[in-house]
Amino acid sequence: MSAHTGTGSRGSAAVLRRLTARYRRQAPGEPRAVGYLYVLPALAVFGVFLLWPLGQTAWLSLLHWDGLTRASWAGLDNYRDLLTDPALRAPFAHAAVLLLFYAVLPVAIGLLLTAALTRFRIRGMTFFRTVLFLPQVLAMVVVGVAWRAVLAPEGLLNDTLSAVGLGGLTRSWLGDDTWALPAVGTVGTWVETGLCLVLFLAGAQRIPRELYEAARIDGAGPVREFFTVTLPGLRAEVAVALTLTLVAALRNFDLIYITTSGGPGNATSVPAYEVYRRAFESGEVGSASAMGITLTAVIFALTMVVTRLVEGRRR
């Protein structure tokens, strides 16, 4: 009887030790399952207002539907049209051009200004940053209305060019097939540069000053100092800036709608505006849904590429 009791006690002790060891391996605090309860309301909102509409859009992209009459099955025809129809490919080509103005140029200008501001002390830095960041706090509708007036045939830009003797350069910037897209892109550069600069200046404050001093002692000039100290120290901020500006470029709708409405012709049509036009003006809901799903996939792929590149470099 006592031997049996001793064996049972040793077994209970072993089970208790295993449970204790398992508990110690887990993170302290509440059990992990409780954490999911905390995020469940946010997940529910995310699912109802994002995942469910996204799934509905994916379903509509497989149909021929004008929004009113009975829909018919299309399969992958709408996606096939995106690859074969030049009118559907053009908005994505225009979006690729806007990536240069919305992402590449603002990041490059922001890095250049950050390099200069970290090497030279400038008075009034707070005012300087506030002015450059101001476009970010303005509604894009306000920005579009203001720049439409500036770029009008009798607007401020043409008046200024005429006043300085460059009247031969005046044109209808938003009505010219060649210059309409670069003009809209320039507005995007103006809007996004302040965001990039503020992000980079905030990141530059984390870079130890000793690194700059060591680089200068070694005889590094401004260019070498930028590539060996400033740029590596701002890798995370560059990733954030690229992600935000890439998304802003690809989902651009309100600026196009206010300034050009996709014109002249379709010279400034972009995917987001084309989705609106096809769904609510042309009655091509299936085609618009396919374009919206494709745009979502492109945005997701680009942001993943940027994230992977940064994480790979960190490792």
Image: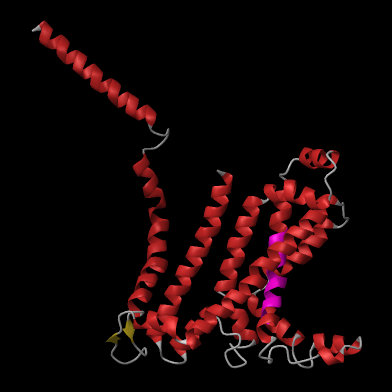
Q: How is the image coloured?
A: secondary structure
Taking the view exactly as shown, the residue that stands out farthest to the right is 164
Where residue 53 appears, x then y in whole percent?
38, 72
In terms of depth relative to the viewer, which is nearer, 218 or 151?
218
Task: Please say if 114 is above or below 52.
Answer: above
Image quadrant where one finds the C terminus = top right
Q: Residue at x 73, y 67 (%)?
A: 134
* Residue 301 shown left or right of residue 41 in the figure: right
In terms of depth relative to the viewer, which is nearer, 72 or 165?
165
Q: Quick check: is 3 in the magenta stretch?
A: no
Q: Residue at x 58, y 48 (%)?
A: 313
Extent of the magenta region:
184-197
* Residue 172 shown left or right of residue 301 in the figure: right
**Do we see residue 33 in this rendering?**
yes
When asked about the image quadrant of residue 103, the answer is bottom right
Where residue 9 appears, x then y in whole percent?
19, 14
Image quadrant where one finds the N terminus = top left
Task: Please say if 16 is above or below 39.
Answer: above
In terms of depth relative to the viewer, which is nearer, 46 or 182?
182
**Do we see residue 253 in this rendering?**
no
Q: Residue at x 36, y 74 (%)?
A: 58
Q: Quick check: is 196 in the magenta stretch?
A: yes
Our reading of the magenta stretch's main secondary structure is helix
Where residue 225 appears, x then y in whole percent?
79, 48
* Residue 303 shown left or right of residue 110 in the figure: left
